[in-house]
Every structure is written in structure tokens, then in C-alpha cells.
Image (cartoon, helix red, strand yellow):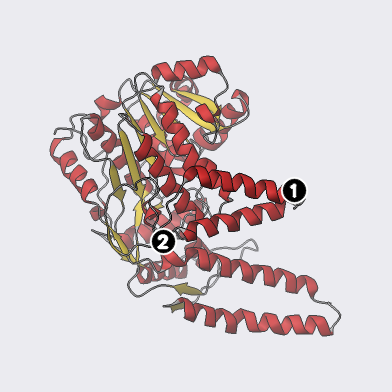
Amino acid sequence: MELGSILQFLENKTILVTGATGYLAKIFVEKILRVQPNVKKFYLLLRAADAKSATERLRDEVIGKDLFRVLREKHGAGLHSFISEKVTPVPGDISCEDLGVKDSSLKDEMWREIDVVLNFAATTNFDERYDVALGINTLGALHVLNFAKKCVKIKMLVHVSTAYVCGEDAGLILERPYHMGMAKRGDEKIDVNFEKKMVQEKINELKLEDVPEKEITSAMKDFGIERARLFGWPNTYVFTKAMGEMLLVNFKDSLPLLIIRPTMVASTYKEPFPGWIEGVRTIDSVIVGYGKGRVTCFISGPRSTIDVIPADMVVNAIIVAMVARAKQHSEIIYHLGSSFRNPVNMSNLHDFTFRYFSEHPWINKEGESVKIGKGIVLSSMAKFYTYMAIRFLLPLKALQLFNILLFKKYQDVYTVLDRKVKLVMRLADLYKPYVFFEGIFDDLNSEKLRIISKETCQETDIFDFDAMNIDWEDYMINVHIPGLVKYVM
């Protein structure tokens, strides 16, 4: 099979992107607008009440970002007219039928024109409210599929999932689909309709009891974790994403489908420039906390590998996989990561972070340099709990006792510290499966795609996604951590 020209494939294509304000979605849109200005049109689905709000979100949360700096320099004063011609913001919501698109003439136009649909929409909070996560990650995927089926020129649906739908599997994790109802624990089958019904019943029950909204949110978060762990997934995010995949595989019929499973997505490696990032991603919370002097310990299993992949490599792989699928390539699932061919572990990350912030200390709000220590590495959760008990829980108990003896003089201080400690313990519980993750993501399909691309593609350099090319020391110290400092910290 020959891929031929990727740029030629993209020419004159009309593409629907959901979750358009998301990190990967923005990089995908920017890439195509930059390398193939002859793309016909992007429809960008944005959660908004109306066209005016959608246009504002497009301006403020997509085009206005530093990510579009290169495109801005390329087009100069003509950028606005270029974007107006190529990009149509669509107010909607994937948790609704027909993606919540209310404008019937716009909807008919989309069904007539769209060639490819990419579903980037997701809520990635590990402990999202179960009703919200189910609506976006699971039922949202089905709504996107049903919308794509109504597009008369549709070539394929590309669904961006996560490699961690594998749950806490260990060993070599293959690029295989999840079949409908398949649980990771126990004999009970997963029934999405039953989950939907349970969610509604739970909310109705809480509202009947006049539970405050804040407590409903907390209860729905706990309910999501409870349902996820019942079936063998560690959190609500990966559980609802796995169910979303099940629905797509089960109901795709004859529609060509691609499921992309990236691992931990990091800052851009090269394009449009190195180090662009938005938001604190999975490993970044540790790096940021350490740089600010708030994290003094690292939790890491002796056999744990951190699977990281730069965002622009993920986008390049998606585009190449789209071309391959259009050429009738049979593979539909791709792991995009580094653990199989070019792994990096927590001790490497600890070392890179220490070296960077030792040489380039973070400057706090008071204008002072934050000095960091080497910190300690805890190799088990038992050691972490012991560390927390000695360092925080025992002093907190002492403060609680003093507070009682002094007629609650230190109540505010105690409440704040207690809340912080509880938050740390909850986060440790949520991140535990990834800190001690012992799986390696097989990327045979992705490797086959890389080989086909190198041998038969005319623009291999423009769409590089080979993680073997990454020098992790150079990338982390000179690209990723500086990017975090610039855009996040």
C-alpha cells in the first residue's frame, strides 16, 4: 500500500473537529491550516449557547493562542480573512443528539459537505462527575458516530481516546478493541443504558433529598469512581472512555473508524515551535509542584515506566493514519507512545527536573528564587503513607488538640491544612495506578504505519511521529520544562 501525498489528501477536504478548544484539537487545526492552506473548510464544534459565543471562543481560546504565532506571522494582516474563509465555529454540545447543533440550515450544510470527522472532545478529569463523564466520553462518542453517519460524503471517523483505557493491565498491552460489555473485573457485563439509568436515578434521589449542589457534585464524583472500580478501571475518566470505544466498535456498521490511543501527551517537540503546552497534564503536576517547592517527594515503582509522547507527534500520527485508512489500510487502533521503543522512567524525570530547577529556579510572586532540594523517592504507597503520617498527619493531629485546648483559636489554620492534606491523599489515590503502572504499550500498528510512511509518503519529514528520535534529556530540560515555566507556571 502506498500513502502517496498527504498534502494532496488534505487538499479540498472538509473536516469536522469536536472538542475544538482542547489541547490536541488546536494543534491539529493549526497544523493543517499551516501546511495545507488549500484545505476546504473546518467546522469546529464549540460548547456555546449561540453563534456569537462560539465565535468569541474561537477567537479567544483557539486562534488567539500563541500556538497560532507562526500562522499569524505567515499571513500577517490577512489572517482574519483566511480564518473566516477556512473555519466555521459551530455552537453545540456532543452530549446531545445531533451534537446539539440547533441551526438546521448549518446542520444540513455540514451533512452535505463533511469528509472526515475527528472527535477530540473529552473530559479528562480522573474524578469527573459520573453524569458529566458519561455524557461526554461515552454517550458523546455515540452522538458523534451518529452525526458522522448522516454525512453523505463521509470518508471516516477518527476518535481520540487514551492508551489508559487498559486500566491497570501489566505487561505488553496490545492494540486491540474493547468489545461491548467487556469488564476487566468480575463476571458482570457492562450495560451502558443501565449506567445511564443509574446516573439519572442517583441525581433524582439526591435532588429529592434537597442535597446542595456542591454535595451532589461530590457524590457524583464518588459514584463514578465506585462504578469504575466495580468493573476493574481505576477512575471515571478511563472507564467512560473505554465505554465510548465499546459503543463505536459495536455501532460503527460500515463507517470506516480510527481509534487513536495516545499515552501521556506532553508539549510540542518541534511544531509549530518546540515547547508549546496548555494546562497541567498528567506528569506536569509533579514537575510544577516540585519547581515551586511544594512537592518534596516522588512516588515511583521500581519497574514503572512513564509513557510520554509530544503533542505534535500525536497529531502527525493522526493525519498519517487518516491517509492510510482512506487507502483501505485495515488497522483501526493505534497506540501512540514511547514505552516500547524509547522508555523514560520516574527516576529520569526526577533527575531532569532537579537539574533544570537547580540551574533555573522558579521566581515566585514576591520575586524570590525558590530553592529546591533533591527530594526523596518513595518506592511504595506504604512508604508514602508513612511519610505523610510523620510529616503532616501527626503535626495536624497536634494542631487539632491545641486548637481544642485553646477554644478553637487556630480553627481556620487547622481547616485549611486539613483540607490540603485530604486533597493530597485523594490525588495520590487517583494517580497511584499511573505512578506504579507496569504496562508497556505495544505499538505494532503504529510502527507499521511509520514504515509505510517512510517508504511511500512524499512528506515524511513534515509528519514525523517516531518517538525513537527523542532524546529525553534534551527534550525535558530544553523543551518541555521551559515550556511549562513559560505557559503554565
Q: Residue at position x 64%, y 50% from top?
A: 202
The residue closer to the viewer here, 95 or 451, is 95
The x and y percentages for residue 198 are 58, 48
The quarter of the picture where the N terminus appears is: top left
Q: Residue at position x 34%, y 19% from top?
A: 153
> In which quadrant of the rendered view does residue 152 lie?
top left
> Which is nearer the N-term, disc 2 or disc 1?
2
Disc 1 packing (10 Å; few <14; some 14–19; many ≥20): few
Q: Is residue 213 left or right of residue 70?
A: right
Disc 2 packing (10 Å; few <14; some 14–19; many ≥20): few
The answer to whether residue 400 is above or below residue 228 is below
The residue closer to the viewer here, 66 or 457, is 457
Q: Which mark is residue 71?
A: none
The x and y percentages for residue 221 are 59, 55
The answer to whether residue 344 is above or below residue 459 is below
Q: Residue at position x 44%, y 27% from top?
A: 147
Q: Which residue is mark 2?
A: 186
> In which quadrant of the rendered view does residue 308 lie?
bottom left
Residue 259 visible within the image: yes
The x and y percentages for residue 188 are 43, 55
Q: Name the element at disc 1.
A: helix
Tell me the amino acid under the disc marked 1.
Leu
